[in-house]
Amino acid sequence: MIEAKSGARVLVVNAMGRIFMEALDDPFAAIDRELTACPLGKGADAIIVDFHGEATSEKQAMGYFCDGRASLVVGTHTHVPTSDLRVLPGGTAFVSDVGMTGDFDSVIGMAKEEPLQRFLRRVSTARFEPAAGPATLCAVAVETDASSGFAARVGAVRLGGCLEQAVPAFWA
């Protein structure tokens, strides 16, 4: 739980998906416990769920699972911004993957040479080194309704680097 500059209580929850990471506990049960213990509008003024997973299908399922109980469900981990940003029917903002902040002229933020060699030769020859080019900031902006905590509007944010720049129309 954090206190926003406005004084609002914001619950931030992180869970990891199980697709390709089967050893992890059930993220749906974990999220359900947290949202039940600290419901939107009672325990928190806004709730952000960061869902770290490989598969967009699992991230979408988490979005619908949390719809009507969280302000935002944002997918992370695949490092590529998706274009499915929207407010779900129950008032929860959702995006499958927000993307990364870093150099997009890279392989998930790393200098391209070593990851490429690993794919070609299936052998590690050196450490991954961070890419050193211009960074792109990928994010989402969410405007919430102060009385309900649900998303009123959501928009993509992409600043700097090589991707097309984007700011939400409601920032104007």
Image (tube, rainbow, N blue to C red):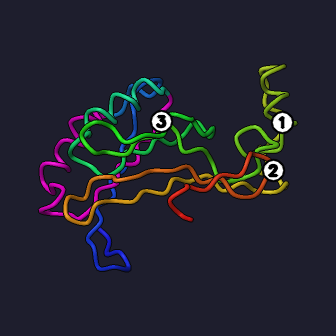
The answer to which of 44 and 157 lies nearer the viewer is 157
Q: How far apart are marks 3 and 2 (CA)?
A: 24 Å
Residue on which the image places disc 2: 131
Q: Residue 114 carries which label?
A: 1
Q: Which of marks 3 and 2 is nearer the N terminus?
A: 3
Q: Which mark is residue 96?
A: 3
**Side (left or right) of 70 relative to 118:** left
Is 56 rendered above or below residue 131? above
Q: Which mark is residue 69?
A: none
As helix, strand or loop, the secondary structure at mark 3 comes to loop
Q: Residue shown at 43%/45% (left/top)? A: 74
Is residue 163 part of the magenta span, yes or no? Answer: no
* Amino acid beneath label 2: Ala
As helix, strand or loop, the secondary structure at mark 2 comes to loop
Is 62 rendered above or below residue 145? above
As helix, strand or loop, the secondary structure at mark 1 comes to helix
Mark 3, Cα crowd under 10 Å, few <14 / some 14-19 / many 20+, is many
**Side (left or right) of 147 relative to 59:** left
Q: Residue shown at 32%/71% (left/top)? A: 2
The picture places residue 47, in percent across and down from the top left corner, at 29, 56
Chain part drawn in magenta = 25-54
Q: In which quarter of the image is residue 134?
A: bottom right
The answer to which of 98 and 130 lies nearer the viewer is 98
* Amino acid beneath label 1: Glu
The residue mark sitting in front, 3 or 2, is 3
* Amino acid beneath label 3: Ser
